[in-house]
Image: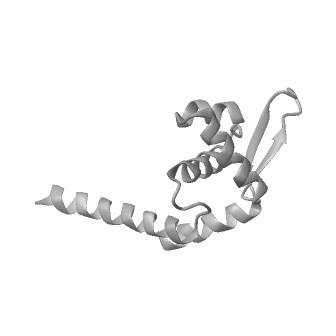
Amino acid sequence: MGAWVQSANIAQKLLTIRRWERLHMPFPSSPVSCEIIYLVSARAAEEPASVKELYLELGYSEARVSDLLRQLVEAGWIISTQCPRDKRIRRLYPSDRLVKLLATAASKI
Protein backbone atom coordinates (compact mmCIF):
# COMPACT_ATOMS: atom_id res chain seq x y z
CA MET A 1 0.00 0.00 0.00
CA GLY A 2 2.92 2.39 0.73
CA ALA A 3 4.17 2.24 -2.86
CA TRP A 4 0.73 3.25 -4.15
CA VAL A 5 0.64 6.25 -1.83
CA GLN A 6 4.16 7.28 -2.80
CA SER A 7 3.44 7.01 -6.53
CA ALA A 8 0.19 8.95 -6.04
CA ASN A 9 2.10 11.73 -4.27
CA ILE A 10 4.67 11.91 -7.06
CA ALA A 11 1.92 11.95 -9.70
CA GLN A 12 0.14 14.76 -7.83
CA LYS A 13 3.32 16.87 -7.79
CA LEU A 14 3.85 16.26 -11.50
CA LEU A 15 0.27 17.30 -12.23
CA THR A 16 0.80 20.45 -10.18
CA ILE A 17 3.88 21.26 -12.25
CA ARG A 18 2.01 20.65 -15.54
CA ARG A 19 -0.88 22.89 -14.43
CA TRP A 20 1.58 25.61 -13.47
CA GLU A 21 3.31 25.29 -16.86
CA ARG A 22 0.00 25.66 -18.73
CA LEU A 23 -0.83 28.82 -16.80
CA HIS A 24 2.54 30.57 -16.73
CA MET A 25 5.11 29.27 -19.20
CA PRO A 26 5.64 30.84 -22.60
CA PHE A 27 4.36 28.48 -25.31
CA PRO A 28 2.77 26.13 -22.72
CA SER A 29 1.50 23.72 -25.38
CA SER A 30 5.08 23.00 -26.43
CA PRO A 31 6.95 20.61 -24.15
CA VAL A 32 10.07 21.38 -26.20
CA SER A 33 10.00 25.06 -25.19
CA CYS A 34 9.62 24.07 -21.53
CA GLU A 35 12.63 21.76 -21.84
CA ILE A 36 14.67 24.54 -23.45
CA ILE A 37 13.77 26.89 -20.61
CA TYR A 38 14.54 24.33 -17.92
CA LEU A 39 17.87 23.31 -19.46
CA VAL A 40 19.04 26.89 -20.00
CA SER A 41 18.04 27.84 -16.45
CA ALA A 42 19.59 24.74 -14.87
CA ARG A 43 22.91 25.25 -16.66
CA ALA A 44 23.18 29.01 -15.99
CA ALA A 45 24.77 28.58 -12.56
CA GLU A 46 27.59 26.46 -14.01
CA GLU A 47 28.86 26.64 -17.57
CA PRO A 48 25.94 28.16 -19.48
CA ALA A 49 24.54 25.97 -22.24
CA SER A 50 25.57 26.65 -25.80
CA VAL A 51 23.15 26.45 -28.69
CA LYS A 52 24.89 23.32 -30.00
CA GLU A 53 24.71 21.63 -26.57
CA LEU A 54 21.01 22.40 -26.50
CA TYR A 55 20.51 20.57 -29.79
CA LEU A 56 22.51 17.58 -28.59
CA GLU A 57 21.01 17.29 -25.09
CA LEU A 58 17.36 17.70 -26.01
CA GLY A 59 17.30 15.22 -28.86
CA TYR A 60 14.74 17.09 -30.94
CA SER A 61 15.31 18.24 -34.50
CA GLU A 62 17.71 21.13 -34.83
CA ALA A 63 15.11 23.05 -36.82
CA ARG A 64 12.46 22.73 -34.10
CA VAL A 65 14.82 23.70 -31.28
CA SER A 66 16.25 26.57 -33.33
CA ASP A 67 12.79 27.94 -34.12
CA LEU A 68 11.59 27.80 -30.50
CA LEU A 69 14.87 29.19 -29.18
CA ARG A 70 14.63 32.13 -31.58
CA GLN A 71 11.07 32.83 -30.37
CA LEU A 72 12.13 32.61 -26.71
CA VAL A 73 15.03 34.99 -27.31
CA GLU A 74 12.86 37.45 -29.27
CA ALA A 75 10.20 37.37 -26.55
CA GLY A 76 12.79 38.17 -23.87
CA TRP A 77 12.76 34.85 -22.00
CA ILE A 78 16.31 33.75 -22.88
CA ILE A 79 19.47 35.79 -23.52
CA SER A 80 21.88 34.64 -26.21
CA THR A 81 25.43 36.02 -26.10
CA GLN A 82 28.60 35.37 -28.03
CA CYS A 83 31.28 33.51 -26.06
CA PRO A 84 34.24 35.87 -25.51
CA ARG A 85 36.80 33.03 -25.85
CA ASP A 86 35.33 31.48 -29.00
CA LYS A 87 33.23 33.73 -31.23
CA ARG A 88 31.61 30.70 -32.92
CA ILE A 89 29.83 29.71 -29.69
CA ARG A 90 26.61 31.31 -28.44
CA ARG A 91 25.91 30.94 -24.70
CA LEU A 92 22.36 30.92 -23.35
CA TYR A 93 21.18 32.50 -20.11
CA PRO A 94 17.77 32.91 -18.49
CA SER A 95 16.55 36.51 -18.59
CA ASP A 96 15.57 38.30 -15.38
CA ARG A 97 11.99 37.82 -16.50
CA LEU A 98 12.49 34.04 -16.65
CA VAL A 99 14.30 33.94 -13.31
CA LYS A 100 11.37 35.75 -11.68
CA LEU A 101 8.88 33.39 -13.30
CA LEU A 102 10.71 30.31 -12.04
CA ALA A 103 10.98 31.85 -8.57
CA THR A 104 7.19 32.06 -8.46
CA ALA A 105 7.04 28.38 -9.41
CA ALA A 106 9.20 27.50 -6.43
CA SER A 107 6.63 29.02 -4.09
CA LYS A 108 3.70 27.25 -5.78
CA ILE A 109 5.07 23.75 -6.21
Residue 59 vs 21, above or below: the answer is: above
Q: Image quadrant of residue 99? A: bottom right
Residue 47 falls in which quadrant of the image? top right
Q: Is 32 rendered above or below residue 28?
A: above
Examine the rendered structure and indicate whether residue 71 appears above or below residue 22: above
Query: Does the rendering let one see residue 44?
Result: no
Pick whichever, 85 or 27, lies toward us.
Answer: 27
Please give left or right for residue 52 compared with residue 29 in the image.
right
Residue at the spot 77% in from the left edge and 59% down from the top edge: 76
In front of the other: 93 or 2: 93
Residue at horizontal 70 percent and vertical 36 percent from the top: 51
Q: Nearer the viewer, residue 16 or 65?
A: 65
Q: Which quadrant is home to the N terminus? A: bottom left
Residue 84, position as x, y percentages in the image? 89, 33
- At horizontal 75% and vertical 52% (from top left) the residue drawn is 73
Residue 33: x, y in percent? Answer: 58, 51
Q: Is residue 34 visible?
A: yes
| Residue 98 rendering spot, x and y as whole percentages | 68, 61
Q: In which quarter of the image is residue 24?
A: bottom right
Seen at 83% across and 42% down, the residue is 81
Task: Name the foreground residue: 5 vs 20.
Answer: 20
Q: Where is residue 92 in the image (x, y as percent from the top left)?
A: 74, 44
> In the displayed structure, does residue 79 sit left or right of residue 24?
right
Above or below, 20 against 6 in this view is below
User: Residue reaching furthest left?
Assistant: 1
